[in-house]
Each structure stands twice: as C-alpha cells, then as structure tokens.
Amino acid sequence: MAADAAKKLILVVDDEGDVRTYLTTLLKDNGYETMAASNGNEAMDIIKQKKPDLITLDMSMPEKSGVKVYREVKESDALKDTPVLVVTAVTGFGDKSEEFEKFISSRKHVPPPDGFIAKPIDREEFLARINQILG
C-alpha cells in the first residue's frame, strides 16, 4: 500500500461497468478512496465538486469523450494540476500503446497526461503507475 494512500481520492472514469468495478475495487484494496463516473459529463461534475487527487480516464466514452474531459481539466486554472492517468484500449496504432502515448503527448495547448495504461490492464503496472504519480 502506498504511503498516505487512505488520504488520496481517485476518480475512475470509464463507460464500462466491469472496468469501473475492477479498478475501484483494486484501488480500495490498496487503501485509496475512490469515486466512479460512467461518462465525461458525470466525470466533470465530480471533478469540479470533489477535486480528486488523481483521475483515471478512459478515452472512448459516450456523451463527452475522455479527450474532451482531459482538455477541460488541463485548461482550467482550478483543475489543471490534477494528475490524469489515461486508461484505454483505443490506441489507434495497432495496439502499440507507446505510439498512442507519443501522439497524445504531442497535442498542442495541453500538457501530456501523467501516465498511460493500455487495456487490458496489467494490475501491477497500474498500481505502480498510480503510486509513482501520487508519490
């Protein structure tokens, strides 16, 4: 368990219920507080109200995509310092996550995400990245 994990709130944003359940359970089992959102609009409401310590963000969702949520967070003075870990199966580069990570990190006007995890999610890699981001 990460130091001070119990004090850290992580928002899990994914339109797939099974993924939300898996990630929130995994995080709770490792001492983190969690909240979950099933779409981008719900996510933005929670982010503005609760100001989580970290957001895990799926890119492909109905109503408002993860890309739009990411831009909104990073373009907001109040939210821009919130770390975002992108968790997605959509790489657009034949499952080469490093190519997608390079692509999303090169977008103008917004900084690159704090991390990237490709689906299917490797449990150990996911937890290691969370611990690394939250220090």
Image (cartoon, rainbow, N blue to C red):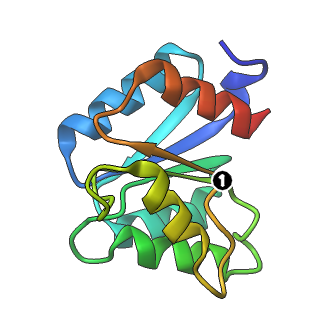
**Residue 126 seen in the figure:** yes
* Residue at 67% in and 23% down: 6
Determine whether 129 is above or below 30 in the image.
Answer: below
Determine whether 103 is above or below 57 in the image.
Answer: below
The residue wearing badge 1 is 114
* Residue at 29% in and 65% down: 92
Q: Residue furthest bottom?
A: 109
Residue 131 rendering spot, x and y as whole percentages: 68, 28
* Residue at 70% in and 69% down: 79
Give SS at disc 1: loop
Q: Is residue 64 left or right of residue 115?
A: left
**Residue 87 seen in the figure:** no
Q: Is residue 10 left or right of residue 51?
A: left
Determine whether 92 is above or below 29 in the image.
Answer: below
> Split into 4 quadrants, where in the image is the C terminus?
top right
Residue 59 rendering spot, x and y as whole percentages: 36, 63
Q: Is residue 3 left or right of residue 42?
A: right
Count of marks overlaid on the render: 1
Residue 19 rendering spot, x and y as whole percentages: 26, 38
Name which quarter of the figure residue 109 lies in.
bottom right
Residue 76 rendering spot, x and y as whole percentages: 68, 81
Q: Crowding near pointer 1: few (<14 within 10 Å), some, many (20+)?
A: some
> Split into 4 quadrants, where in the image is the N terminus?
top right
* Residue at 50% in and 70% down: 103
Question: Foreground: 116 or 99?
Answer: 99
**Which amino acid does the dot numbered 1 rest on?**
Asp
